[in-house]
Amino acid sequence: MKHFLLATMALVTMCAFAQSPAHEALRKEIAELQKKPAVFKLPPYLDAEKDFGDVCRAAAAKNKKVIVSIGREACGRCQRFYELVQRGVVKIDTKAYEFVRLDIDEHTQREYFMGTFDPPNGNLPFVGVTNGELAEVKPCLTGSAKPAEYQALMDAPKPAAKPEPPKQTK
């Protein structure tokens, strides 16, 4: 009986740590991406409640939009998106956009994310574009989008240049 219990515990442990085919494919895709040289330096994670509003206001003052990526360190799909950006598969025009990463591993950050952005299905990563209006992050993608879908989001129409004030005539 003792050997049966030990064997059962070993089998349950192995099954608990087994990876699904989708998870294994994601892990392999990330490993392949990591073989490419990095061409884009990822910004550090911001504190959503303290820093995000400041970044949006600063970007708006420079006539830039903000690409916001919300994810978790433990999220494979989130790490895949970051690798796509870092390796240049998905390119971000830094003249038109600020790129922001928000980590929602902490419970308070998750509450802020869900309450502020109201994601369509709650899947991570959440990647969207805002013009500085914190509640207006559209268009957006969630879950495992294809690189071309992420790139289309990054290539969306750029913000219009600020009009020059009219010249005064004497």
Image (cartoon, rainbow, N blue to C red):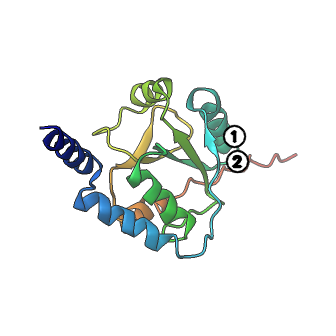
Q: Is residue 120 above or below residue 140?
A: above
Dot 1, how many residues are within 10 Å of its Cα: few (below 14), some (14-19), or many (20+)?
some
Percent across and percent down for residue 111 are 43, 24
Dot 2, how many residues are within 10 Å of its Cα: few (below 14), some (14-19), or many (20+)?
some
Circles 2 and 1 in contact, beta carbons < 8 Å:
yes
On the rendered image, what quadrant is the N terminus found in?
Answer: top left
Name the residue type under label 2: Lys
Percent across and percent down for residue 37 are 60, 75
Disc 2 secondary structure class:
loop
Task: Please tell me the numbered disc located at residue 62.
Answer: 2
Q: Residue at x 49, y 45 (%)?
A: 73
**Is residue 161 or residue 15 the one in the foreground?**
15
Residue at the outermost bottom position: 36
Name the residue type under label 1: Ala
Q: Left or right of 126: which side holds 21?
A: left
The residue tagged 1 is 58
Residue at the outermost front position: 2
On the rendered image, what quadrant is the C terminus found in?
Answer: top right
Disc 1 secondary structure class:
helix
**Is residue 7 or residue 114 the one in the foreground?**
7
Q: CA distance from mark 2 to mark 1?
A: 7 Å
Q: Left or right of 64: which side holds 117?
A: left
